[in-house]
Amino acid sequence: MVIYGIDFGATNLRIASVDPVNGEILDEPTYLALEDFHSSEELTRRLCSLIPHGSSVGICSAGVVDEEAMTIRFSANTSITEDITFGRDLQERHGCHVTQTNDIKAAVQAVARFGEGRGHANVLLATYSSGFNCALIRAGKNVTTAEFGHTVYKPDADLYCGCGGRGHLEIYVSGNGAASMARQYLSIRKLKRHRLLELALEDITRASGRDLTPRDLDEPALYAWALESVSAKHVYRAFAEDPSGKPQADIRRIQVRAIADSFGRMNSVYNPVDIIVLMGSQTKDWDALFEPAIELYRCEDDTVQLSSMPKPPVVKTRVQELGIRGAVAHHLSLG
């Protein structure tokens, strides 16, 4: 028996058949560009052509998911404005056995069943990417889908979260936070010559095909474009080139502190936790961010949690295609 996993992601819908015993993906995933679909019905028809009638199907997606109705109520990743109903349609019109959930609940199931969480009863997955969130499994069952990133970390901070709140933990540990801090520094200093702006300009040059040089940053419109384009990857590339340079050194120090605090906060709130598994684009800078954050967390006594509370191991997941495998793992968790 195989189960089909569907990951409704940021730019693509990915689908593949998965061995439910070991989570092995049995065929090369099929990628469907979301921009090619303009209605839920178009997605349904395409998926019905790819999935055999009567199959077992697990679906995960970003956005607002109605698990009972098997619909995506809202997704920022597509121009489709209506409810996206391919999950319900596959069950009602194609005879499939379908389950559907959001992406982080699926991802924690993947690492618990097929990855680093195997053998542990209490598995916490945290994703550090453009945002920050976590989810917990106890004895194979999802028990929470948190919005942990929107807990207050620095109540008097001037940095605003994407949700509009001030001082949330997410802005201090995420890629969006690193970019926001960098842009704030450049704006306040009114700098038009900085390595961060040069790195952003290099990306603009490649994307636009224009022949641009740092001198072009004197043009107000291009400077504004470069400033807005500064991202976390530029911050940590600049840090790799010049670890003592500003603002990248300060941003790195702030984020290491906040990430270490996030481990203790999650462990305190969701205790008991047997293992903390990390994923997301920020973990690409593992050496710069997470190794020192883990060391800081290990060395501190009671700054971020009670000293009597065990500190679980913190590891990075190596599970590939977490969405596809997670959709299948969540399907299996429901029996």
Image: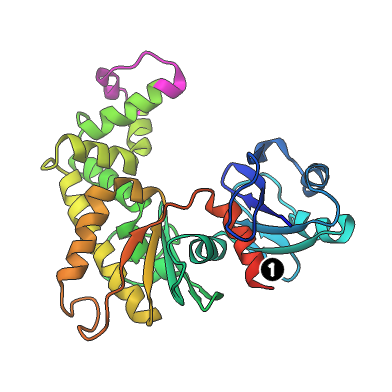
Query: Quadrant of residue 32 in the image?
Result: top right
Q: Is residue 206 above or below residue 116?
A: above
Look at the image and tell me in which quarter the N terminus lies: bottom right
Where are the magenta residues, as a range? 206-220
For mark 1, what is the residue? 67
Give me the residue at 37% from left, 82% from top. Answer: 271
Q: Is residue 62 visible?
A: no
Query: Residue 13 location in percent, x, y?
Result: 65, 45
Query: Quadrant of residue 73 in the image?
Result: bottom right
Residue at the extreme bottom: 308
Dot 1 lies on which element?
Answer: loop
Give me the residue at 71% from left, 50% from top. Answer: 81
Look at the image and tell me in which quarter the C terminus lies: bottom right
Query: Residue 95 location in percent, x, y?
Result: 87, 59
Give me the residue at 41% from left, 15% from top. Answer: 210
Disc 1 crowd, CA 10 A, few/some/many (<14, 14-19, 20+): some
55 left or right of 230?
right
